[in-house]
Each structure stands twice: as structure tokens, then as C-alpha cells.
Image (cartoon, rainbow, N blue to C red):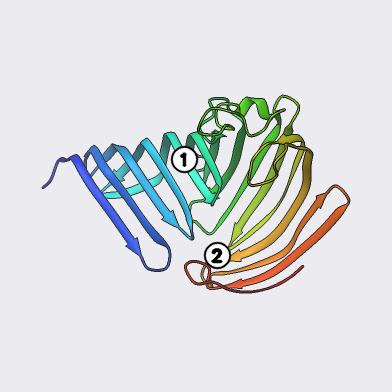
Amino acid sequence: HVELVRVHEGNVRLTDDTLGQAEVKALDGDLRPDGPATLHVRDARLEAFGARAAADGATVDVTLAHGKPVGLPTIDVKNGTLTPVRGLELTGIRAAVRPDADGERQIIDVHGSYGGASTELWNAVGYISSDMHTGKLTLRCDRFKLSQLDSVLRNKDGTPEILNASRGEMDAHLDLGFRDEKLAFIGGAHLAGLTVAHPMLAPQPVPRLGFDARIKGVVETRERTLKLSELAIDFRNLHSVIAADVQNLGKKPRFAATL
């Protein structure tokens, strides 16, 4: 009869040819066949569908009965990063995932910033069902001045690329809904008041940049397809709408699109 399993500096690596890979470089904890158990995770990384995530540390609390989890775990993540698409880096993430009173859902509460900035600039709240078949997440980035990102909006020599960050401002929202292996999304973003200085853009600073954007679509995770119903962008007097159907999401996608 095993009374205690102690894990010290454990390493876990999971690889799936379709979904991606995950790795935990340091895992510590005491596991008892019956009773509460706590696992401490350090230096965790995940790659899936082209997105990347990492965390300096996380704590997982779970109750075991005869060696199997009973109910839903509690998870706390500190100093995480998420890169959902190339060029967009969410940083300083702290997250809490806890079961609700009925134990039927995991309640999600996440806060973070961008590109290493110290100010908290966005939050996400929602849930995922205990059977992992349904879920919802609401992401909100309230309007803020780009001067709050001053530490990351600079060239390598320290000179600013965005000259009037004090007047530039942006906000964004995104709603995600997951059911039966289908992920639906709808959102939008607003950016205004920029003056950008970069030699690849123009020899002189370019003033009054900004846009409004809307997006709507569905991802089928099992089929690895994306139906982009609409990506609409308004830039000054230019209105553009893009729609697309993408198959084989991942390394070698195939797509058809209209503009």
C-alpha cells in the first residue's frame, strides 16, 4: 500500500502530432492516494496550433481518491506569457482557475499586459465545463494611452518609434465560445492618434494613424479548419472586408479568401 509519492525536480514532456507539445521543466509535490495534493510547477511551456504560452510558475491543488482526481482542481499561474499570433505578445499574466460552488465549471480569471509593460492593461473572465465540452471567455482591453507602453515602444537605441504615444490610444474586445469542438469568436479593436517614425515606413514621421477593426469566425478543432466570416478594417476613408476558409490549420494550411 503506497501512502505517499514525493516528486522532486520532475520533468514532463507531452507531444501530439496534431495538437502540439507541452513541457514542464521542474515539478515538485507530495501525492497521496487519498486526500488533498499540491503540485508546484516551474518553467512550463506550451505550443499548440501555432500559439505559444509559458509561465514561470504555477500551483495546482487537487483532491485524490484511490489515486484518481475527485472534483475539479484549483490552478494559480504567475508571470505567464502568451503569443496567440506572431507579433502579439501578452505578458505579466496572472491567472486563477477555480471550481464553482457546484463543481460543474472551472471559473477563469486572468489579468495581464503587453510586451513586458508593467501596467495591467487587459483582463479575461469566463468558464469551462468539467467535461471540457463547453466554455466561454470574455476578453476586455479598456481604452488606454499608448504612453503606458513607453518601455516597449522604442528602437534598440532607445529612441521612440511612436512619437506621440501620450495622445495615441487603443481598446479591444474579444468574446470566445466553445462547444462540441467548435470555437466561435467575435471581437473588435480601435486605435487612434498615432505618429510613427520608422525608416521602413517613410523617411519622415507619419502622423494621425489609426483604424477600427471587427472580426468574426469559427474554428473547428477536430477538423482543423477556420471559417473567417468577416475581418473588416476601416482606415481613414478606406473600408476593407476579408472573408476566408482555411483547412489544415498548422504547418501547411490551405485557404481560399476574398477581399
**Is there any visible trace of residue 104 in the rendered image?**
no
Please give the label number shown on residue 181. Answer: 2
User: In the shown orientation, is residue 103 left or right of residue 254?
Assistant: left
Residue extending farthest to the right is 237
- Decide: is 121 above or below 249: above
Q: Residues within 10 Å of mark 1 (few under 14, many from 20)?
A: many
What residue is shown with label 1?
81
Residue drawn at the location 67% of the way across and 49% of the way down: 175
- Decide: is 213 above or below 18: above
Q: Depth check: 43 or 259 in front? A: 259
Q: Amino acid at mark 1?
A: Thr
- Percent position (x, y) of residue 69? 33, 48
- Percent position (x, y) of residue 116? 50, 32
Residue drawn at the location 48% of the way across and 58% of the way down: 50
- Residue 37 falls in image quadrant: top left
**Is there any visible trace of residue 187 in the rendered image?**
yes
- Percent position (x, y) of residue 192? 78, 37
For the C terminus, the image quarter is bottom right
- Decide: is 56 above or below 70: above
Q: Depth check: 109 or 5 in front? A: 109
Q: CA distance from mark 1 to mark 2?
A: 25 Å
User: In the shown orientation, is residue 156 left or right of residue 8?
Assistant: right
- Residue 148 falls in image quadrant: top right
Residue drawn at the location 75% of the way across and 64% of the way down: 242
Q: Residues within 10 Å of mark 2 (few under 14, many from 20)?
A: some
